[in-house]
Image (cartoon, rainbow, N blue to C red):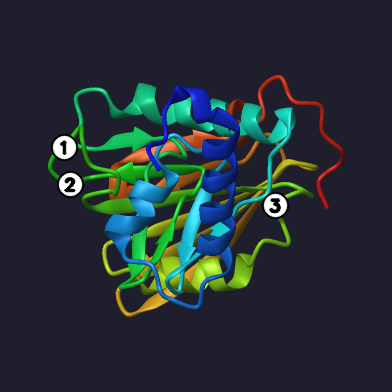
Amino acid sequence: MLLSDGNRPLLCRLRTLAFRMALHSETLMSQHDFFRFIRGREGVWELVDGRVVEKPRTNQRHRYIAANTLALLHTRSRAKSYRPTSIGTGILTTACTIRFPDLVVDCGARNDEAMLAMEPRVVVDVLSPLTRGFDPHRRLFEYKSTPKITSVLLVDTETACVLVHDRRSERWDASAYRGLADVIELPAIETRLALSDIYDGVELGPAT
């Protein structure tokens, strides 16, 4: 049967069926098929152990903090060799897992058509009540297991608090930055981020 524009209801049902089958299929999805799957699809999706998982939706506060941080990194990156990119840039953490952090600082060769960071150096995940329960410990483990990543920033949305994990040779150190007067040092990209700038315009509770 030839499907044309006159068969739109049937087309929609077939696409919905294919979508549900992909979500529940036991067959592992390849990277190539995953990027075909998410092309033009609403929401943010990740490939986890070869299976498609939708990330929780975020609120305005979450997105505002992410936008502040992206703007800061973009300003700092001028005349430097790294590029901050937003949530649309993926990180290949294992052969069959692709994560999409809120922000990625890419220090690799520029490729405007790439869906994956060429050389991810710094990762930023904003933790809001909507996203805090989305596998944060496993995500952090995967980031730390990715050789080129040197810093992981976990940014709270309720208080002025950023937890920074830094690679130090063969180990990782964790530092908590609390309060708007604190400043984060990111030596790998020769950048400093003030919490007052990250949380600019955001109403916050007291730091704990």
Residue drawn at 31 percent across, 53 percent down: 121
Residue drawn at 19 percent across, 24 percent down: 79
Residue drawn at 86 percent across, 41 percent down: 206
User: Which residue is the site of mark 1?
Assistant: 111
Query: Which of marks 3 and 1 precedes in the sequence?
Result: 1
Of discs 1 and 2, which sits in the foreground? 1
Residues tagged 1 and 2 counted as in contact (Cβ below 8 A): yes
Across and down, in percent, residue 183 comes to 55, 40
Q: Residue 130 bears which disc, if any?
A: none
Calculate the distance from the C-alpha at mark 1 to the C-alpha at mark 3.
29 Å
Q: Foreground: 47 or 184?
A: 47
User: Which residue is the site of mark 3?
Assistant: 131
Q: Amino acid at mark 2?
A: Gly
Residue 90 visible in this rendered orientation of the protein: no
Task: Name the quadrant containing residue 143.
Answer: bottom left
Across and down, in percent, residue 104 comes to 39, 44
- Quarter holding the N terminus is top left
Q: Amino acid at mark 3?
A: Thr
Indicate the secondary structure of the residue bearing disc 1: loop
Calculate the distance from the C-alpha at mark 2 to the C-alpha at mark 3.
28 Å
Tag 1: Cα neighbours inside 10 Å, few (<14), some, or many (≥20)? few
User: Which residue is the site of mark 2?
Assistant: 108
Calculate the distance from the C-alpha at mark 1 to the C-alpha at mark 2.
9 Å
**Horizontal side, residue 108 vs residue 31: left or right:** left
Q: Amino acid at mark 1?
A: Asn
